Amino acid sequence: MTITHQFRQYCKSLLDQELLLFHPKANADVAIALVYPNCYELGINNLGFQTVFRLFNRLDGIYAERAFTYPEPFESITRTLETGRTLADFDCIAFSLAFELDFLNLARILQRAKIPLLARDRSEQHPLIVAGGMVMFMNPAPVAPFLDVIFIGEAEGLLESFSTVLLQAKHENVSRKKILEKLAGIKGLFIPSVHDTGATESIERHYRPKTETVPTSSALLTSAGMFRDMYLIEVGRGCPRGCRFCAAGYVYRPYRVSTLKEIEHSIDPQLWKNRPVGLVGSAVSDYQELPELMNWIIKKQGKLGISSFRVDELSPANIELFERGGLKSITVAPEAGSEKLRRVIHKPIREEEILQGARLVARSKIQNLKLYFMLGLPFEEESDLDALVDLSGKINEIYNEKGSSGSVKISCNAFIPKAFTPFQWSRMESHKEIDRKRNYLLQRFRKFNKVRFGSAKSTHEDILQGIFSIGDEQTAGLIQVLSQDSGNWKKTSLEIGFDYETLLHRDRPYQKRLPWDFIKGPVPKAYLWKEWQRAREEAGK
């Protein structure tokens, strides 16, 4: 059996498990390959990726197929899931980027598809290479040299304008240069070869039109993804809290929610009867109609899925609804071990609120409690690490006292500065220091029998993500080399003269131009700086 035949069988096994909730086209004038540069299991449950897939296929004259990074032995294959057509044969390749670390996969996919990585090296015969997704809202500079078009903002309302230009160009045989010049006139599209990134706030972020009131929801269901047949629906976009480290709370401003009636009218309950319904949003626990929505789902014989919840919003009433909805796991994110550091990051949750939340979960039918913290937050001290250990010890005692059979997992990832947040001026801690703190906590946590300690990423990944999060266009050279040899990023940086130390491990002054300053953010830069100074004051620095 050839590798091509094996790949088609692999694709068929995935497609057979999908239930499409719309009718995609089989063909049209303009063909778009929509690529999620990570594994299928992760990408297929990304609501933004699903939404763009549906939106493209609803536009006249446009159709889209999907592609991912594939597992062994198919890792070198760059073909679509639906027809196995090679990416290089499409009119446009559109990357959906949710994580900075996927910058490497983007570069690998283009190279494996035998498409020149640098946009300036492409000819009229090559597809137009575009990218969107949340990381493009923040800092697209590290991959800008690879891309012809970058979506700065939300896709709804923007894809139609973009596709109209492509469709007209296809009919009139317009040159690549003319296409990009025309696209440069659309608000929310950044054309690296046309726009001046030296001009402050020259590109304005695009937001979902106010007339668009239908909540974003699943375009398909599948048992092959991470969430296994879960129907996803967005209850709100953005967050009203303003945590100083959190990009989602700033780049998605203003905070917007759907009404309960809009949600109820947007879906057919028969589609998700006896399926889990995943409520999506950065601030699900702040949704004012949440109890009514959960009751409605439960009455329709649906099951609940909630990715994360504010620990200070846990209540007996909410826990009861979670139990009735069959929720088996709840995730909370205190972020810091001490109350002082939580005030500094503008997440002023009291320790007693965290402990009370743990008590409620421990005596419930919910089997798993996950708590997310960050290491290396600005102004973090050793006492903050000890406070995290003490807090975890108290949670361990609660689970022992209640005789709970459930498990508690503490996850600690490194703090990474993000564009358009007050902490965008902060340094990131060194690889050595992050490892030291992780090892210190690992040793201290060994005495607990109910609480486990771990992290979702390695320190190597944390540091690389930090470089990609705040790097400028020079970072593209590092990405290009790493994507080809998968080598050690530290060694590679030294070999090519990439100064990651200055980039990542030093505070940035207000006067220094940031790589994303050409994008007009939803919050004035001066306000973000004031918040950074307030954090200093609250930390006593």
Image (cartoon, rainbow, N blue to C red):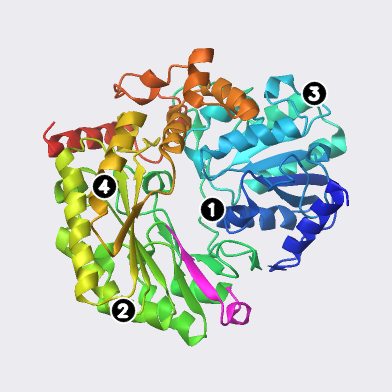
Query: Which span is picked out in magenta?
Result: 267-281
Whether 506 is drawn above or below 301: the answer is above
Residue positioned most to the right: 1
Circle 3 is placed at which residue position? 123
Q: Earlier in the sequence, mark 4 or mark 2?
A: 2
Circle 4 is placed at which residue position? 443
Residue 118: image quadrant is top right
**Can residue 441 be found in the magenta stretch?**
no
Tell me: 84 left or right of 405.
Answer: right
Residue 316: % across, % down: 26, 78
Secondary structure of the residue carrying tag 3 is: loop
Closer to the eye: label 1 or 3: 3
Q: Amino acid at mark 2?
A: Ser
Q: Amino acid at mark 1?
A: Pro
**Mark 1 vs mark 3, CA separation in Å:** 35 Å
Circle 2 is placed at which residue position? 364
Q: Which sits in the foreground, 81 or 141? A: 81
Circle 1 is placed at which residue position? 209
Q: Earlier in the sequence, mark 3 or mark 2?
A: 3
Name the residue rendered at 59%, 77% in the picture: 272
Q: Earlier in the sequence, mark 2 or mark 1?
A: 1
Q: Earlier in the sequence, mark 4 or mark 3?
A: 3
Whether 131 is drawn above or below 353: the answer is above
For the residues labelled 2 and 1, say whether their Cβ atoms are less than 8 Å apart: no
Whether 90 is drawn above or below 482: the answer is below
Q: Amino acid at mark 4?
A: Gln
Assign the C terminus to one quadrant of the image: top left
